[in-house]
Amino acid sequence: MTLDPNTCYRALRARDARFDGRFFVAVSSTRIYCRPVCTVKPPRRENCRFYPSAAAAESGGYRPCLRCRPELAPGNASVDATTRLAQAAASLIEDRTLEEDSLEAIAGRLGITDRHLRRAFGAEFGVSPVAFAQTQRLLLAKRLLTDTALPVTEIAFASGFGSVRRFNALFRQRYRLQPQQLRRAAPPASAPDTLNFELSFRPPYDWAALCAFLGARTVAGVEAMEANAYRRTARIAVDGKVNTGWLEVGPSKKKPALRVAVSASLAKALPPVLSRVKALMDLSCQPAEVAQALESLAGFRPGLRVPGAFDGFEVAVRAILGQQVTVAAARTVAGRFAAAFGDPVATPFAGLTTIFPSAERIAMLPYGRIAKLGMPGGRAKTILALAEAVAGGDLVLMPNADIEATLDRLRALPGVGEWTAQYIAMRALAWPDAFPHTDLGVMKALGEKDPKRVLAAGEAWRPWRAYAVMHLWQTLQ
């Protein structure tokens, strides 16, 4: 990533939120690095160094600012092939995949050589994947020390360190602080079994529209939208162990951020939990770039986001259930599906009782048990084929998956057409240029009946066609 120092400094002086997370400024006189939106007095230009990532700044010998907290900066969405590749690898590292798989295995998962991955990663973030992973572990630990009351020992292991001794030594070496020093201020008050976090975004953010979209599609027992908050159950495997619990997401009253409450039962799975929330709520969006590409189409609802997926398999099943039926009808059958095959879980919320069934569970079912829930036989066969592909590892429904290869695998499944494949790419793969051009709502909004003409019209909105779809659906409300 090429950074122009003059542009960066102007953004810093203006505290321009459009650049938050896109670069970090390190101050040579204090040896501290900050986000460009930091509220401290801007340093002198000659004292500033600009880095493409927090990891690069730390590799340069700087420690994170305790006021603006670089670990809270939003991520970056992109459609550029090399940038998206590097971001996909970064997402896998944030999910602690690098600790379970080698760099070569991660490269293979992305369909490239490890040499190409190192080159792309270094160009985007300014450091190696291993150095990036180390910084992410430290920043997560810093966040947990600041925002939770978890014991230091639990924080060390939850952050991915093999021992408390190694964690303490590296923390002192990198940040010149004892971990306990971040505990001088009491963490925010919360229930003893709840961990609280904030996840930043670049404004504007149309929270109301996102709530309406998710609320209309909640799976009974698994999700709920109540009192301006989205809640859901969760199951995440880490180090071969399954962690279950719940989470709640709502807007912050004072900051451009979302508040996230996570059950303490998910403490050992925090990196993938937070990563999935970011994807679900589309927190890496760059609304200024989207608005520029969509022009007048985006003027009606500025800050409109593309809802992602907390669980790619879950969203894919919902997409199949939604084929040629209303949103309400698909929601009803999805609730039956979860109740029949999901697992019970304890939560403090009356409406959250069930964890959506895993692909492995569904792949073991006979076709008849799925079909009797009230769906056409062909749809049941499609869900079974989907589950078998996901459970077998042939299909990866995550934002870091290869787009074209995944689309091809989806289209090869019986009963999966272009609409279903594009909708899954739009949400489960977080592909900002996904375009279900055969969607009846999209055609109605454009006043077109020919999908080919809809596809042609969509060329004007590349590479953000998924956002165009959301805006077109909004015009029908």
Image (cartoon, rainbow, N blue to C red):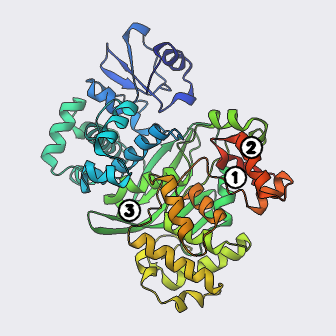
Choose the circle earlier in sequence order: 1 or 2: 1
Q: Quarter of the image containing the C terminus?
A: bottom right
Label 3 crowd bin: few (<14), some (14–19), many (20+), radius 10 Å: few
Any part of residue 336 in sight = no
72 sits left or right of 477 in the view: left
Choose the circle earlier in sequence order: 3 or 2: 3
Residue that numbered label 2 is attached to: 301
Label 1 crowd bin: few (<14), some (14–19), many (20+), radius 10 Å: some
Any part of residue 178 in sight = yes
Q: Quarter of the image containing the N terminus?
A: top left
* Residue 230 numbered mark, or none: none
Q: Residue placed at 74% from the left, 40% from the top?
A: 298
Which amino acid type corresponds to the residue marked 2 in the rendered image? Arg
Residue that numbered label 1 is attached to: 209
Choose the circle earlier in sequence order: 3 or 1: 3
Q: Residue placed at 46% from the left, 15% from the top?
A: 5
Q: Secondary structure at mark 2?
A: loop
Which amino acid type corresponds to the residue marked 1 in the rendered image? Ala
Separation of marks 3 and 1 at Cα, in angstroms: 31 Å
Q: Please state which of residues 121 and 58 is positioned toward the viewer in this rendering.
A: 121
Count of numbered marks: 3
At which x and y percent is residue 450?
81, 58
User: Which quadrant holds residue 34?
Assistant: top left
Q: Please state which of residues 183 and 295 is positioned toward the viewer in this rendering.
A: 295
Foreground mark, 3 or 1, reads 1
In the rendered view, tell whether residue 347 sits above or below residue 54: below
In the rendered view, tell whether residue 309 sits above or below residue 472: below
Residue that numbered label 3 is attached to: 193
